[in-house]
Image (cartoon, rainbow, N blue to C red):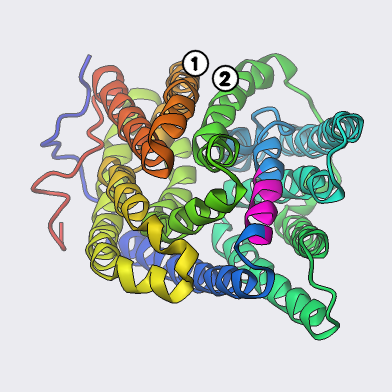
Amino acid sequence: MSVVSDNTTSPAPSPRFRLALGLRAAVVFAATIIGTAIRFVIQIVLIRWLGAAAFGSFVFARQWGELMAKLPDRGYVLGSVRFIPRYLAAADAGRHRGVLQRAILGTLRTSVLLVAVAALIGWALGQDQSLLVGFSLAIVISLAGLLRAAVQGSHHYMPATVIMELGQPLTMAAGFSILYWLDRLTVLSALLVVFGAWFLITILEAGLLRRITPRTVVSAEPVFEDEEWNRSTRQLFLAQLGIGVINISDVLIVGITVGTIEAGVYAIATRIAAIGRIANAAVESLVSPQIAAAANDGVEGYPAIQKTIDKAIRISIWPSMAFAVFAIATSEPVLDFIGKDFAGGRSVLIILVLGNLADAVSGPSGHVVSLVGSERTYAKIMLTNAVLLLAIGFPAGLLFGLVGVALARTVVNVGWNLALFTVARSQFGLWCLPSSRTLQFRS
């Protein structure tokens, strides 16, 4: 049943709220842009230093670690965004301490076990050391992501983002420079630098979380609501797994079906295309605690959620569209500059850039569906589309190469955004698309 119409007349957020959200979004956006630029420069330098073949092997191993990192937290990344704002608002120190303890220790134990099993299997199959180091990235990436989400749920997403988006690439840049100066830069040593950078970010995020967590929570006796947490986080975990497969597996599909050199070409195209998602991701992360807090009020909170959605779309859609135009216009000279082996990725880049516009157009639809009360539906949508990507991605890669995989990824990207919009509209009456109201610079 529709509860909030597209023409809702509920009170608009205060000017102070708009200004604060806009300033935080600007800082997060700037940090993410700078961090992405540094990472992009690092990719180009590594290509020049390692060569296309070795760079492809580096990307292939790193992607395995990033994919495995989606498994250990068991749904507590999104669960932290959902539960921590509630416990903060209610001053429920026991449950706040409990959810943090359960999430952090559970993620650490599971990630270590997962990496040990994967490394044992890889060793038995005769895989080289670089792939085994790639597996180990799952430990530090999963912990860093969880700690960042816990900080985000505590309404301090901006400093957590600055630490991760600037600290991680700057640390990698320093490490790679030292290796190059010592003439020790190889695929294995490069992966060790990536591991070290993520380890440092994990320590910094943990320190930030400790600092912002109220003393009453730190000293409280933990209270565990296992039944409620497991019910919600189980579905959120399945959703995160689906997201991880969608965001990472296309590079692995290219590496398996076409080759590791082509995986490097495809990875560069995805890195460039992902810049167009920065504004949307930054704003989504900032507004998700507000969505979760308003969702606790039930139907009465839906008007506030709709206003937050409108604001998020208004802030993110224009820079996303501007980047798409710029990226398509400059795709050929940019890829030529990176290297002659990467010029063939132009079609892939254009396809992915256009597909990523679906994220900006649908706004924070994923957070709306998952945080307002449809975790099961959210999980089904993301898992279905992850399976769809695997089902059409492998044959597309075998038949049409890089372009085929890019088209498969774009179809899936548009599909899950459309499905989330439909659920948000039909179940909650929330409109997660641009309208004449949301496209105005002022509301």
Q: Which residue is mark 2?
A: 235
Residue at the image point whose x is 56% and y is 57% from the top: 157
SS label for mark 1: helix
List x then y, in percent, for residue 121.
86, 28
Earlier-in-chain disc, 2 versus 1? 2
Q: Which residue is mark 1?
A: 376
Residue 61 part of the magenta-drawn span? yes
Query: Hey, which residue is sitting farthest bottom in the picture?
Result: 181
- Where's the C terminus, which quadrant? bottom left
The kind of residue on which mark 2 rests is Gln
Q: Is residue 269 above or below residue 233?
A: below
For mark 2, does the 10 Å Cα neighbourhood hold few (<14), some (14 to 19), or many (20 or more) residues?
A: many
163 left or right of 3?
Answer: right
The kind of residue on which mark 1 rests is Arg
Residue at the image point whose x is 15% and y is 62% from the top: 442
Residue 296 in view:
no
List x then y, in percent, for residue 113.
88, 31
List x then y, in percent, for residue 404.
37, 36
**Magenta part of the protein: which range?**
54-63
Which of the pair 204/208 is nearer the observer? 204
For mark 1, does the 10 Å Cα neighbourhood hold few (<14), some (14 to 19), or many (20 or more) residues?
A: some
Residue at the image point whose x is 30% and y is 17% from the top: 427
Residue at the image point whose x is 74% and y is 75% from the top: 176
